[in-house]
């Protein structure tokens, strides 16, 4: 008889617990394996592949920027960049400490870049762009001990002429998070045009990045290249700017804050675009430091401001051209209308002075413009009224952008009674019309707007869009885009009345009493108009202090607009010297030298 084996009673509860525990353990292992093999399969496959195979970007060479004759404004050169692959870093504290010593960067800043969470996985982090040869030697020497460090070679913007045309050209910099949201086909670390020409023509200049697939070892060192796609270089941009004329204009400005711009009045092509003070675009190409940025933005004269299109100034007596046109067209004066100037014009209880203390006597329109008689235009403005005067100002393209292909252009301000009531909650006073007639009061314009005005006077009344680009070419010299003159409006003035004004503008420089006689140039006539724009109002009827007797910020702005030759104009010029004093003495000679330089270049001289 077979006896059935029986377990001791005291072992039965423990046996059941063992079975349950074993089932739980095996079930946990099974769930974990299922999670790793099924749920996380794609992620771990990616991690596995990236531990062996990496994709490396090959940056495209950015297109060059040339002047109208094909001379290089902006080029490229190779640079060495210190990069880190965070996934390969095994000693974060040690790496940040050594990089801080070699690159002179605070360790906290390096650590913040490496540990940032808003980057894609296996994406190289830029620690320092364009490192020096000394820094490169140190990093290469100790590179085997710096796990995660990589040195990349990439093209970087080069500016052979330093600050020349910097405010026009703009600069490039690393794309930020806000730009990434707006721009497609860009990634963190890409360089992008931030302003100026670099921003406007970004789509042509950028090029298409290439890449290579490389095999790496356990610490991220490249072993061999598996595949490679070559980058496509950006297209080359030819500007309308003449490099020689541009450099000459900037030399003329010297240390003065201001603007000199020149244009072909028949096409709207900008020949020179000079701003001072300026900046070095190369600072941004390699990554500007916090200290350098703070110095630029805190500079009292604002070197980053593009004064040609962003600076807003009262036009002073240059605006008398518009007042004269409005008076003639509206019939409130004729070329023969004579008005009296005794040096003070009383309107209501206030006396308005002329710049000439003794007055000009009996003045017609020709003398009013050539000698810039304030009292003559006070009376013309009084007859016109603010609404008609403002309407003609807008007809001359003032109070709105010119349409130039640059970022940040200001529209300026042409005041009206309605504007003042809505903006300031006050009525318009007739005395303000008198000030507006000579380019004071609330009116504010950009230098480019006044350049467009004088160019339209020169070419017979056509407002053209200012052009700064001639064409875009690919690397094989094939023309992709060619820019043509664009008419945007016609001046609201008849040919007969325009001829009257043009004749008077020649008198400004040719007559012995003309306010612009300092601009005379042997062998060629020049038509022009001076302007002296008050920055502050001076009370009383006494002598107005000379510029050197006043604080710099209280001095008048000096203007001069001109074109030459008067019969067949080839060049139009605007000069603004901030707080320079009288336009005839501070601005007119600079315009003369720009015209002289243009004519000598035309003759093939340097």
Image (cartoon, grey):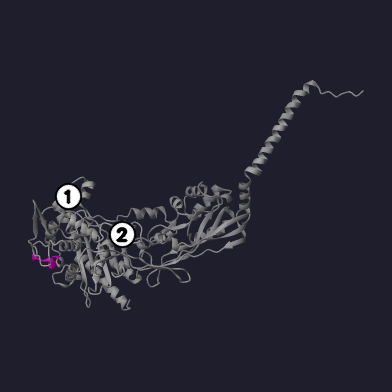
Q: Quadrant of the N terminus?
A: top right
Write down the residue under mark 1.
Answer: 428
Residue 276 falls inside the magenta stretch: no
Q: Residues within 10 Å of mark 2 (few under 14, many from 20)?
A: many
Instruction: Residue 472: give x, y in percent of width and height.
Output: 42, 67
Question: What secondary structure is found at the residue carrying circle 1?
Answer: loop
Residue 16 position (above or below residue 434): above
Residue lying farthest to the top in this orientation: 9
Instruction: Residue 296: give x, y in percent of width and height.
Output: 35, 55
Magenta range is 361-368
Q: Quadrant of the C terminus?
A: bottom left
Instruction: Residue 153: give x, y in percent of width and height.
Output: 52, 61
Seen from the viewer's position, the closer of residues 67 and 568 is: 568
Residue 367 falls inside the magenta stretch: yes
Q: Residues within 10 Å of mark 1 (few under 14, many from 20)?
A: some
Q: Which mark is residue 309?
A: 2
């Amino acid at each position: 008889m077979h006896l059935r084996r029986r377990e001791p009673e005291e072992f039965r509860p423990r046996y059941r617990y063992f079975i349950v525990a074993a089932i739980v353990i095996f079930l946990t292992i099974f769930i974990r394996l299922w999670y790793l093999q099924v749920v996380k399969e794609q992620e771990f496959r990616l991690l596995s592949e990236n531990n062996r195979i990496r994709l490396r970007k090959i940056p495209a060479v950015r297109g060059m920027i040339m002047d109208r004759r094909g001379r290089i404004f902006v080029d490229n050169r190779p640079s060495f960049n210190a990069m880190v692959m965070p996934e390969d870093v095994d000693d974060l504290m040690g790496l940040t400490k050594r990089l801080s010593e070699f690159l002179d960067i605070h360790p906290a800043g390096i650590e913040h870049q490496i540990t940032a969470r808003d980057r894609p996985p296996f994406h190289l982090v830029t620690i320092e762009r364009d490192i020096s040869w000394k820094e490169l030697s140190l990093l290469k020497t100790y590179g085997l001990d710096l796990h995660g460090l990589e040195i990349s070679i990439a093209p970087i913007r080069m500016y052979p002429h330093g600050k020349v045309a910097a405010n026009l050209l703009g600069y490039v910099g690393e794309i930020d998070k806000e730009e990434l949201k707006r721009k497609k086909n860009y990634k963190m670390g890409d360089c992008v045009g931030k302003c100026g020409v670099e921003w406007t023509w970004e789509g042509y200049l950028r090029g298409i990045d290439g890449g290579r697939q490389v095999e790496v070892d356990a610490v991220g060192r490249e072993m061999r290249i598996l595949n490679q796609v070559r980058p496509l270089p950006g297209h080359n941009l030819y500007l309308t700017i003449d490099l020689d004329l541009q450099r000459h204009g900037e030399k003329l400005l010297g240390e003065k804050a201001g603007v000199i711009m020149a244009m072909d009045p028949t096409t709207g092509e900008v020949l020179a675009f000079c701003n001072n003070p300026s900046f070095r675009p190369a600072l941004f190409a390699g990554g500007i430091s916090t200290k350098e940025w703070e110095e630029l933005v805190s500079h009292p004269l604002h070197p980053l401001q593009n004064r040609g299109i962003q600076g807003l100034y009262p036009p002073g007596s240059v605006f008398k051209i518009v007042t004269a046109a409005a008076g003639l067209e509206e019939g409130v004066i004729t070329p023969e209308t004579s008005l009296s100037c005794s040096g003070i014009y009383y309107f209501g209880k206030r006396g308005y002075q002329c710049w000439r203390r003794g007055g000009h006597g009996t003045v017609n329109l020709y003398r009013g413009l050539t000698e810039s008689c304030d009292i003559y235009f006070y009376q013309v403005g009084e007859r016109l009224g603010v609404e008609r005067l403002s309407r003609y100002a807008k007809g001359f393209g003032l109070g709105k952008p010119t349409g130039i292909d640059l970022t940040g252009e200001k529209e300026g301000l042409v005041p009206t009674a309605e504007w003042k009531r809505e903006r300031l909650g006050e009525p318009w006073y007739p005395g303000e019309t008198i000030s507006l007639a000579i380019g004071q009061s609330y009116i504010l314009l950009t230098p480019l707007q006044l350049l467009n005005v004088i160019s339209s006077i020169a070419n017979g009344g056509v407002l053209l869009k200012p052009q700064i680009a001639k064409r875009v070419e690919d690397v094989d010299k094939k023309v992709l885009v060619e820019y043509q003159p664009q008419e945007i409006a016609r001046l609201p003035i008849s040919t007969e009345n325009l001829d009257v004004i043009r004749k008077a503008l020649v008198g400004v420089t040719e007559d012995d009493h003309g306010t612009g006689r300092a601009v005379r140039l042997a062998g060629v006539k020049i038509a022009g108009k001076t302007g002296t724009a008050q920055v502050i109002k001076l009370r009383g009827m006494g002598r107005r202090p000379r510029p050197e007797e006043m604080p710099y910020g209280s001095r008048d702005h000096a203007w001069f607009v001109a074109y030459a030759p008067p019969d067949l104009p080839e060049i139009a010029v605007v000069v603004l010297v901030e707080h320079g004093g009288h336009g005839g003495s501070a601005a007119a000679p600079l315009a003369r030298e720009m015209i002289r330089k243009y004519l000598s270049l035309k003759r093939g001289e340097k």
